[in-house]
Image (cartoon, coloured by chain):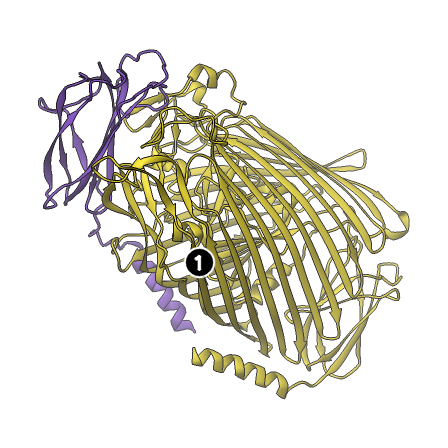
Amino acid sequence: MKIVLGVVAGLFYVSFACGQGFRLSGRVTGGDGAPVSDAHVVLLGTGRQANTGKDGEFSFAALAKGSYSIRVQKEGYRSHRTEIRLERDGQQIAIRLDSAMHVLDEVLVTDNHVERRKQHESLNVEVVGRDFIYRNLGGSLMKTLERLPGVQTIGIGSGQSKPLIRGLGFNRVMVVDRGVKHEGQQWGADHGLELDQFAAGEVEIIKGAASFVYGSDAIGGAIDVKPESPPAPHTAMASVDLMGRSNNGSYGTSVRFGGRGSRWFGDGRATYQRYGDYRVPTDTVHVYDYAVALHKQHLRNTAGQEMNLHLTAGYLGERFNSVLYVSNTYNKAGFFANAHGLEPRRVDAGMHDRSARDILMPRQQVNHFKVISRNAVHFGAHHLQAELGFQRNFRQEFSQYVNHGYMPPVFPDTLGIPMGLEREFDKFVYSLNVKDHWETGRHTLTFGFNGEYQDNAIDGWTFLVPSFDQLTAGAFVYDKYRLNDKTLLHAALRYDHGSLRMSAYRDWFPSPVDDSGTQEYLLRAADLHRRFNSVVWSVGINYDPADAVSLKANIGKSFRMPIAKELSANGVNYHYFSYEQGNPSLSAEQSYQADLSAAWQHGGWRIIVSPFYNYFPNYIYLNPTARFDHYYGAGNQVFQYEQSRVMRYGGELQLSRRISSALTAEVLAEYLFSKQLSGAKKGFSLPFAPPPSVLMNMTWAPDRAGNPFVSLDYKLVGRQYRIVPPERKTDGYGVAALQAGYTVSVANQEVHLNLQVQNLLNTRYMDHTSFYRLIELPEMGRNIVFSMRIPVGIANRNSIKE
Amino acid sequence: MKRIIIFFAMASLLSCGKDDGTTDTEYPVIDIAYADAFPVQCSTIQRGETFVFRAKFSDNVALGSFSLDVHDNFDHHTHSTEVNECDMEPVKTPVKPFVYINSFEIPGAPRIYEASVELTVPADVDPGDYHFMIRVTDREGWQTMRGLSIKIQ
């Protein structure tokens, strides 16, 4: 700790010692020589940015002598990058922008800003844009991202999934949507993420502990979903997406309308998706020993629908910008009817099989409403950002009433709970983030504050987690110091405070409490108030010894506050035959992680190796014990939250080779090993440990009009025999996929076409990290995904320079 | 720097093939396929009488505990875990269904254990379709379950 404080203090000291300043100014013009106003100029790696004025001019003051990369972006023009050497005060440069061919294509055809982003971050970062999303369009955003090495998902049917980063998931991965932490019911394996993949602009994935920027929950990594870029100035635009999937008869559309004056803009997007029961390459699945016959290979009742609406309005000025996002996502999806959790269910097959598109019980439905206000001000060397957010996540799970345990045989209608309502979670979240980015000399300092208040209420006839409210607040300082042209140093320090207040809950039905037959309404959760404090830190380095090589290393401490379920659960999850007991005395989880990454790029070759080592002194683990409890647990196996020492290591390998101008080969591999070093499961792995995998790809993309491409993936997944109760050993498999795309021009209108065949050979396999793995359901069979994107532009002539 | 990378690369490569092989990943087994086992799938039990539950449990290392749960299935909502189905009576509303929930530790953590538990079914409970759930754990927390369909007459 002392060392870290020393390093941070040292960096501060240096910042005051060398605050000299040179001025750099420049002028941006278009192909015709006319000045380009409102172009965004960034000094890469320094965090400094400016917008050009009406005369096309910009300037940066207080710069140090040395080399800089300047990037200029402006809608309607190709992004431009240039290197300059700043040697004297008042140095001037001229930048000429080429106009973009596809002026109105809303997809930013980016330069190498992603590469630069990676090079100036000591953590392991993966950035994907909309092109990646369109090419790999899955049933949900997380499923789409699964292709990335080190990213896996827990799939729940065909329309929902939740992310795992290097094997950690649930509350150990933070999802940030438009600058604000996305809050749903992250703890549940059967709960997907309430995000619209059509509304995502760029997605940044931080693999590894990132608590120091994001706070609690980013202990395993973070997924930062950025919004779509606003419409170009003086244009009105529209875009239409159409999408269909063969496997589950899915169809969907997403439509966007928008317009912008010079500074004010507004846009709206609506997405609708409907899908039927998905198909697996088998006629029979075995729920335990009982053979369930599937009608036309359909997994009964896995149909669903999604409806999302987004409204955005904002002001984009030179020094100040402010954007308001209002969105609502709605999801409704069925669970496989022949088993609820692990519990075999007798079903009315005739009723379910009548239609593959109806959504009957058991099912879940979630509505997520969000209002986010993002604001930024530039003044002097400062860039101040603030986000204000409100979210309401309303989740309901419906199932026929079954009197498990001591529940009354007939559901009483006097309870005030609808008969089908098994669980309900109603969550209100208020967030505030403030961040100041300050450039001074060779330092880029970031000071930040994150605060969040949550109010959670429950309903329904089963109990897992009590109602609770939670307040968290954290402050951090992060310094990026440019030692020389080749080296960037990073240091960060963060303090967090959290307070959780759980409310008491009593069963609505009596249970016996001893052998004499005395009955009581059991107190499941008591009032409990816990506070947590945490100090975390991170230090890192980026070192580029040669043009072709870039190295990075990072070491840091992260933390996670226990969640209400871990502290206060005291209920029977009948569908898992488990009685989960929280542990009110848990301490905040801590993690130490070392990350390395080495990249080499030369003559068509590109190799990136990113190993990591991670140690938790007190990982919170739900331990399945050998005991049963026949009072509070109604005869179910006791699962208890405990803390144990855990060691994990692994890494990813990305290798690509440009064989010819059109042909590229790529290999993406991932490996993860985890082991509990203490506690009841000493020697065992952690649950949901992804098996090693290698994805091999060959892409043919000639440089021709219409940007055609054909890409073939073959993913080889190893077996996973390192399991922990109640998991099952999963054998390895290989699965192939095909992607192709082409842009056609119909009556001067561009139409982007994308085709994918997932599970090309209709392979029957089990995914170790699937929600349905425990009841041996195979994964989705062959799936042909077709999508079409039509960007329509209605532009003001004056602003387009051909 | 280079050394660190080489160390990490070596460490990850070496670890690939490593598996301690010391952890127990086997589920315990419930055997009800021998002559004295009772009840079995589709057994019938008489009201007002006492019967003995009998099953053999085994595990590769050490058994933990077992649990029994008898509940009605008058609404046909849950299914047994067994291969064959039994004849079901029509769906009906329970009035006074028989409920039995109990759990037992298996003393001495043996590898093989024959459980025998005496159960009395009161004379005034609803007759009909019931589920008889047998669950056993081993010391590591692996749980095996059998859900049998039985009838109470």
- Residue at 44% x, 53% y is A563
Q: Nearer the viewer, residue A758 or A411?
A: A411
Q: Nearer the viewer, residue A458 or A289?
A: A458
- A666 versus B85 height, above or below: below
> Left or right: A369 with respect to A258?
left
- CA neighbours of label 1 inside 10 A, class few (<14), some (14 to 19), many (20+): some
- Disc 1 is placed on an element classified as strand
Q: Position of residue B101 (x, y in %)?
A: 24, 32
Residue A689 seen by the camera? yes
- A417 versus A20 height, above or below: above
Q: Amino acid at mark 1?
A: His
Q: Position of residue A714 (x, y in %)?
A: 45, 41
Q: Position of residue A483 (x, y in %)?
A: 57, 80
Q: Quadrant of residue A30?
A: bottom right
Extreme-bottom residue of the structure: A17
Which chain's residue wears label 1?
A
Q: Nearer the viewer, residue A140 or A359?
A: A359
- A206 versus A698 height, above or below: below
> Left or right: A780 with respect to A328?
left
Q: Which residue is mark 1?
A: A529
Q: Quadrant of residue A480?
A: bottom right
- Residue at 46% x, 50% y is A503
- Residue at 51% x, 21% y is A356
Which chain did the renderer colour purple? B
Q: Position of residue A732 (x, y in %)?
A: 34, 41
Position of the N terminus of chain A by quadrant: bottom left
- A750 versus A676 height, above or below: above
Which chain did the renderer colour yellow? A
Q: How many numbered marks does the figure carry?
A: 1
Residue B135 seen by the camera? no
> Left or right: B1 with respect to A393?
left
